[in-house]
Image: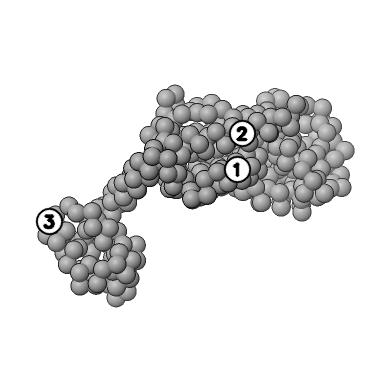
Amino acid sequence: MKLSAIKALVAAVQEGSLRAAARKVELSQPALSKVIRELELELGVALLERTTRGVAPTAQGRALYEHSLKALREFDEAVNEIRQLDGDMVGDLHIGAVPMAVMLLVPETLRTFSQAFPSVRVRLSEELYIAQLQRLRAGEVDLMLGGVPADLPRGEYVVERLARTTMVPTVRKGSPLLGCRRLAELQDAKWVYTGANGDEGYARQWFEAHGLKAPRVGAFANSTLALLSLVASGDCVGLMPHQIAAHEMVRSAISVIPTEEPGLNLEIAALIRRDVAARPLIRHLVSHLYRAAHQLNLQQV
């Protein structure tokens, strides 16, 4: 099975057209059709079927396509790793991060990392914890930034513990809820949950840690922007890192509720797939994460 044939099949499935696929792999359409036909003869099955819109994979073609994507990604990663070991820092990094990590660590990390390695392409995905962990397990992201779950299986990932923060309750400027001093007084308020449902979220953790029933859900947010927007423009309460709440761009629209109970303490870490943890580019990224975390930790002193 030739690498050129695999690339031709992948292009055909992704483009849905033999003509477009031929342009993508820089072959003539007859040459691409011949390569794919030879692959079908080698395997003894049809991989593509013609439709009114172009081509689509058969069940066998879909299976080969999905495995081929992984193989091509691993091949590219191997080539990049060899170049990195030789001192040529190129390649791609895909970082998954929960909203808290996006707010606190990502901006400074990417600023310094991109200056040091301008040829490295970094992709950032902001999602909730469960979705990010699933993507990390599937190999769709190289590294995940977020809290360290208590039920994380031992030995599954390399865990780089970076920083601690305190999540504090926030509301829009001038909200009547600013007069509350006890957590119990906020139980009937509408809260923004950064989770997929009411069974998740930092608000639930905080209330239950103080022996209180979780507050009611006012809205769900799965991004930093959504959290800030919902708190600043509505009547919802939201937990956010105290460093963000104190930022000059945020405090003009959002205020912290000074509750007697201390805020929710959280640890931020990088979870890294063990198969990529030793790669030079990953280690450089981790060092920049530690640098950003050091600045964050100094803000808490």
**208 w.r.t. 122: above or below:** above
Disc 1 and disc 3 in contact, CB within 8 angstroms:
no
User: Which is more N-terminal, label 3 or label 2?
Assistant: 3
Q: Residue at x 77, y 54 (%)?
A: 233
Q: Residue 291 carries which label?
A: 2
Where residue 214 sits: x, y (%)? 67, 34
Disc 1 and disc 2 in contact, CB within 8 angstroms:
yes
Where residue 128 sits: x, y (%)? 56, 43
The quarter of the picture where residue 295 lies is: top right
- State left or right for residue 282 relative to residue 83: right
Secondary structure state at the residue bearing disc 2: helix
Q: Which mark is residue 244?
A: none
Viewer-side residue, 12 vs 170: 12
Q: Is residue 239 visible?
A: no
Q: Looking at the picture, which amino acid does disc 1 mark?
A: Thr
Q: Residue 112 carries which label?
A: 1
Where residue 159 sits: x, y (%)? 50, 28
Image quadrant containing the C terminus:
top right
- The residues tagged by marks 1 and 3 sit, at their Cα atoms, a distance apart of 49 Å
Q: Which mark is residue 42?
A: 3
Q: Residue at x 17, y 52 (%)?
A: 1
What colouring does the structure picture have? Answer: one colour
- The residues tagged by marks 2 and 3 sit, at their Cα atoms, a distance apart of 52 Å
Q: Which callout, 2 or 3, points to the residue nearer the camera?
A: 2
Q: Residues within 10 Å of mark 2 (few under 14, many from 20)?
A: some
Where residue 65 sits: x, y (%)? 28, 54
- The residues tagged by marks 1 and 2 sit, at their Cα atoms, a distance apart of 9 Å
Q: Residues within 10 Å of mark 3 (few under 14, many from 20)?
A: few
Furthest residue toward front: 87
User: Which is more N-terminal, label 2 or label 1?
Assistant: 1
Q: Residue at x 23, y 64 (%)?
A: 48
**252 w.r.t. 87: above or below:** below
